Image (cartoon, rainbow, N blue to C red):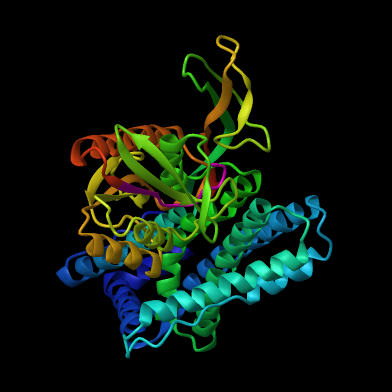
Amino acid sequence: MNATVLQQLGSDNWSMILSILFYIMFFLYLFTDLPQKAQFVRYERGVASRLSLIEGLIVESINKVKSYLSRLGIKDNSKFVDTTLENYFVIEPVSIEPTDIIRRLDHVITVNEQKFKNDLEKLAPELSIHTRNNIAISLSIASALYTVYKILRHYYLLGRKYENWVLLMQLYLMLPQLLRELIPYAKAIDGIVKGIPIGDSVGPLVAYKLIGNASRIDIEDDTVYSVVNIENRNVYVIKAKGPGSTVGRPGKAVAKIAEMLSYKVARIITIDAALKLEGEKTGLVAEGVGAAIGDPGPEKIEIERIAVKCNAPLDAVIVKMSNDEAIKPIKREIIDGVEKAYEIVLDIIKNRTKPGDNVIVVGIGNTVGVY
Amino acid sequence: MIIHLQTDTPLTLILIIAVLGMIVYMIHAGFSYMKKRQHIYQEEIPHKFTTVIKCLNKDYSAEREFREGDFVGKIEGSCPKCGNNMVIDYIYALYTQKKQQL
């Protein structure tokens, strides 16, 4: 029966059916919003599933901080953590009038840090400064993750609200990369609370290798220096005060030491972790010129100003690593980089300064787990 | 049942090829999208933390597993060779690859 019907259709009828199908598809594709609607649903689902993964990361990191605070015997920690996640933002100073912008930026950063430290001290007055610094950094990691999540969620909901498939498409394409970058942040909290050095600790590690267990003298907030003699050169080594998690104020410390030495400084050497490009090896050490420091501006400009005032060459020694390696517990390859950076710093001191010179060496970075 | 399509007109042939091409493209695009969704991300997880202790005279060194409270520069007993102080020289992590679906 069916065969008879099909035979009756004939080749002309088949051709007609195919033509109609083709023209319907052509019309739907070019003259309706159907492809965009289909893409919208696809992007919306993709973004929603990845956002839920990020939400899981936030919950994981917040729980880690709360359990750490509980282990330290801090009661009512939930309220404190929740308040911290929403508060402590910094509004950038006016930039259309650049006069004094660095001083104004430094002021707002300092005020914000001080406010947070005071609140933390009120919460746990019996804890050591190092433990409080570890709590502060763990909380700032959780807070950074939460802020990124809130921004992504904002654009996702906006895209859904106004059916803006272009916005959702951008999120859909960006989220896998963002997720890869956010996962290490959540994992980094484990290392910080245990007090294990991270990739960013290369500067303080090189500084430690230079000074060993020589006495540390407080010079700035969370910042210390030690004086060592290397082949008759007076080497002033600055680092953040360890072994708690802090970066200190190396720029201000350089300014104070230079002033103390009546600006008779022969050389300033900075050592820091630097982001590697894709394809570059982790732990690669490079030497250049300038201030190797990645702060928002106030500390870096201080080092540059002092170098100009003293007419001292400014050397930068960097150890390369990826973004996630900088915040995760330090790898063996980066430790090898620390050894090489230490050799380079020694070489600079011995070969580019004269006996009797004053040299300032600054180990930039987070000093977690490094005395 | 065999249907013999009489493809005597070139338009019919072109249309059949175009429709089949579109169907093949859609199936291929669907499969590649599914494959993309199952993309595996290799995440590095620290599985072991090692503490390296060295004698201040640099004549002896030892490695042990990290204990909470360890930090670089911490004095850890005396050297079995010369009796001088032993200090934690390095702490580092060994990583393992873990597959995670994004």
- Tell me if residue A320 comes above or below residue A13 in the rendering: above
Identify the magenta region.
A359-371
Res. B57 visible in picture = yes
Of residue A250 and residue B33, the one placed in the foreground of this image is A250
Q: Position of residue A365 (x, y in %)?
A: 45, 52
Residue shown at 26% from the left, 39% from the top: A349
Q: Residue A108 location, x and y as percent?
A: 50, 78
Relative side of B61 to A343, left or right = right
Residue at image point 46% right, 39% down: A208
- Location of residue B99 with respect to B78 vertically, above or below: below
**Magenta stretch, main secondary structure class:** loop
* Picture quadrant of residue A98: bottom left
Q: Nearer the viewer, residue A198 or B8?
A: A198
Q: Is residue B6 visible?
A: no
- Quadrant of the rendered image containing residue A64: bottom right
Q: Residue A75, located in which quarter of the rendered image?
A: bottom right
Across and down, in percent, residue B76 comes to 63, 26
Q: Nearer the viewer, residue A339 or A54?
A: A339
Q: The C terminus of chain A is located in which quarter?
A: top right
The tally of labels here is 0
Q: Does residue A187 belong to the magenta stretch?
A: no
A177 in relation to A194, above or below? below
Q: Is B73 left or right of A178, judged from the image as shown?
A: right
Q: Is residue B87 left or right of residue B26?
A: right
Q: Position of residue B78 (x, y in %)?
A: 62, 18
Left or right position of A27 against B102: left
Residue farthest to the top? B81
